[in-house]
Image: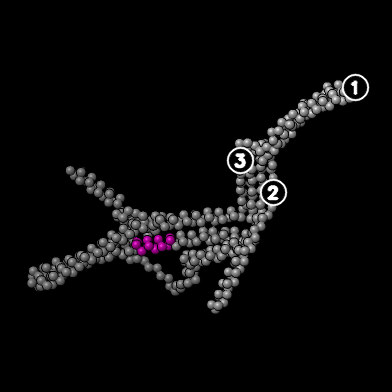
Amino acid sequence: MKRLVSITLFAGITFSLQAQIALTLDSCRALAMENNKELLIGQEKIKAAHYQNKAAFTNYLPKLSATGTYIRNQKEISILNDEQKAGLSQLGTTVGTQVKGFAQQLAVAHPELVPLITSLGNFDIATPLNAAGNSIVDAFRTDTRNMYAGAITLTQPLYMGGKIRAYNKITQYAEELARQQHHTGMQEVILSTDQAYWQVISLVNKKKLAEGYLKLLQKLESDVDHMIAEGVATKADGLSVKVKVNEAEMTLTKVEDGLSLSKMLLCQLCGLDLSTNVVLADENMNDLPILLKENSEINMETAYASRPELKSLELASLIYKQKVNVTRAEHLPLWLYWVTTWSPTHLYTMASKISSKGCGTSALWYRFLSGTGEKAYTKLKRLKQRHK
């Protein structure tokens, strides 16, 4: 039985030690910054701004694009009709027949030429002419059943009115702005953690004070009861002391509730479970050190320069100035591009391909947009003069 009791006590003590977590101010700050979701989101915003800056830098680089098309026709486009194809294919046979007929007429008219005509008749002119006709038919074939065309274009912007440079600066400022906002969030988290930490320390000491005051009143209540029993004090004095004891108990209860809520708030900031029994390192400190510098002067310029909120406002102002440059560049009358194109096509035969290469400079002229911008600027200037 004694062994069972000792095991139970040892398990209870071990569980209570595991449930308690000793924290210092630095560890609370570290846990709060590690588990704060806003700070985690801020870190991801910094990464996103960094990659946007890299993407903006690619606008300085040439762009490579490729396009292509393919058409499958059931029948090819034919330049020659069927009669012309047949005539060219039988060109040698037709010419041979006509030559033989002419030779027979010539032999009848001039008998002395019969040996010569007979020797010439041994030559075969039909086969070469038929082959030549077939080659002409093949040469006129388009073979447009399978057609494709493509182009690879390399485009390098030469002048965009400062739009690319302004956009690159915007992304740089946006990345720095994300860092400053993250720094601002860190300061707010540290401030909230410090407030919760020292509030717990304050309530721990208030609890000690309330417990001491309650013990004093309870001792006074016991002494007054003895005095009433001896007839030295009245019951009214005893009731007055009891009222004070009840008030001290209520105050102690309020302090304990406030201490529990403050620890729960600190656990929430640190990312711990709300039921965690937190023990702070400075709870048993009787005298807190106060560091004061003699003849210390506050430099307001240094203070302003160290504030991330002011830096964020400056960066936002710079971003809007660059946005003005982007808008101005869009209304400039001239943009320049350098373009190089390589275009292989297949439009006639499978063996014949057309491949072309070219390079040049392209200019875009926005005259109407430029005139609209000038008119708007003139109208705005007139309105400002009237207002003055």
Question: As displayed, is residue 386 above or below residue 358?
Answer: below
User: Looking at numbered disc 3 in the image, what kind of residue is underneath it?
Assistant: Ile
- Label 3 or label 2, whichever comes before in sequence order: 3
The residue shown at (53%, 63%) is 319
Q: Find disc 1 in the rendering and name its residue.
A: 111
User: Looking at numbered disc 1 in the image, what kind of residue is underneath it?
Assistant: Pro
The residue shown at (47%, 72%) is 300
Question: What is the number of callouts on the image?
Answer: 3
**Front residue of 84 and 110:** 110
Q: CA distance from mark 3 to mark 2?
A: 25 Å
Picture coordinates of residue 69 (x, y %)? Answer: 61, 43
Picture coordinates of residue 378 (x, y %)? Answer: 59, 71
Q: Find disc 3 in the rendering and name its residue.
A: 71
- Label 1 or label 2, whichever comes before in sequence order: 1
Res 214 quadrant in image:
bottom left
**Front residue of 185 and 245:** 185
Q: CA distance from mark 1 to mark 2?
A: 69 Å
Q: Is residue 13 left or right of residue 62?
A: left
Q: In the image, which residues are magenta? A: 185-197
For the stretch drawn in magenta, what is the main secondary structure? helix
Q: Find disc 2 in the rendering and name its residue.
A: 358
Residue 186 belongs to the span the image colors magenta: yes
Q: Is residue 141 left or right of residue 129?
A: left
Q: In the rendered image, is residue 134 in sight? A: no
- SS for dot 2: strand
Q: Which mark is residue 375?
A: none
- SS for dot 3: strand
